[in-house]
Image (cartoon, coloured by chain):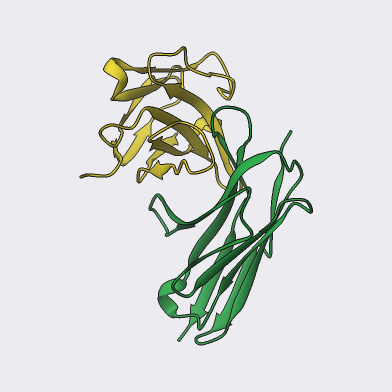
Amino acid sequence: KQEVTQIPAALSVPEGENLVLNCSFTDSAIYNLQWFRQDPGKGLTSLLLIQSSQREQTSGRLNASLDKSSGRSTLYIAASQPGDSATYLCAVAADSGYSTLTFGKGTMLLVSP
Amino acid sequence: GAGVSQSPSNKVTEKGKDVELRCDPISGHTALYWYRQSLGQGLEFLIYFQGNSAPDKSGLPSDRFSAERTGGSVSTLTIQRTQQEDSAVYLCASSLYGGGALDTQYFGPGTRLTVL
């Protein structure tokens, strides 16, 4: 059974800092890994999707890496802003015909002005 | 076009009552997923619909939970005889292909269910 772990569970940083969120998964048979953002009381917004054959994806100040063989991914946020405050969720799609996602419990990020 | 929509946004019910939660996926998406997010827990998969195929119900926690998808579009998740442990945010997602390396799931805002 796939298990996804995210570290840290919570992170508080001052505005402007670069930061790294970590995600690990136990079964490397995945189609892709996705990072989502969830604001309080809201649904999930997809940030980045990394296919299993890729090593990284970038979108603006966000960069996500994937090391499939070791079961690890990182989300790098450059020059953090208060608007980045949210819960960040990592999810992997099983390599089994359809992509039911297995989620980590998330990292709650607070960026202070 | 519009994203995934869910209704109601909040539902408070008494223990033992039945509830229905609705999901309108993105038009043209073949796959629809239901997830549950409980306090302190991650999101857990409940059920998956793909086109006209039989749904994958492997994530449903008990036989009190059921779901249907009419006409390959709108889906309803029904919880019978609700219990306090059913209190959670129920999220619906849809995707274009229902699988594959490039398939992204788009999530609705969720329905927050509180069972008193």
Chain A: its colour in the image is green
Q: Is residue A69 left or right of residue B70?
A: right
Tag count: 0
> Residue at the location (53% across, 19% down)?
B56
Query: Which residue is drawn at the image coordinates 49% and 35% (left, top)?
Result: B35
Q: In this view, does B40 lie above or below B28?
A: below
| Residue A21, position as x, y percentages in the image | 63, 67
Residue sticking out furthest to the front = A53
The chain displayed yellow equals: B
Tell me if B105 is positioned left or right of A65 in this view: left
User: Left or right: A96 with respect to A36?
Assistant: right
Name the quarter where the C terminus of chain A is drawn. Answer: bottom left
Q: In which quarter of the image is residue B63?
A: top right
User: Which sits in the foreground, A32 or A103?
Assistant: A32
Above or below A57: residue B109: above
Q: In which quarter of the image is the N terminus of chain A?
A: top right
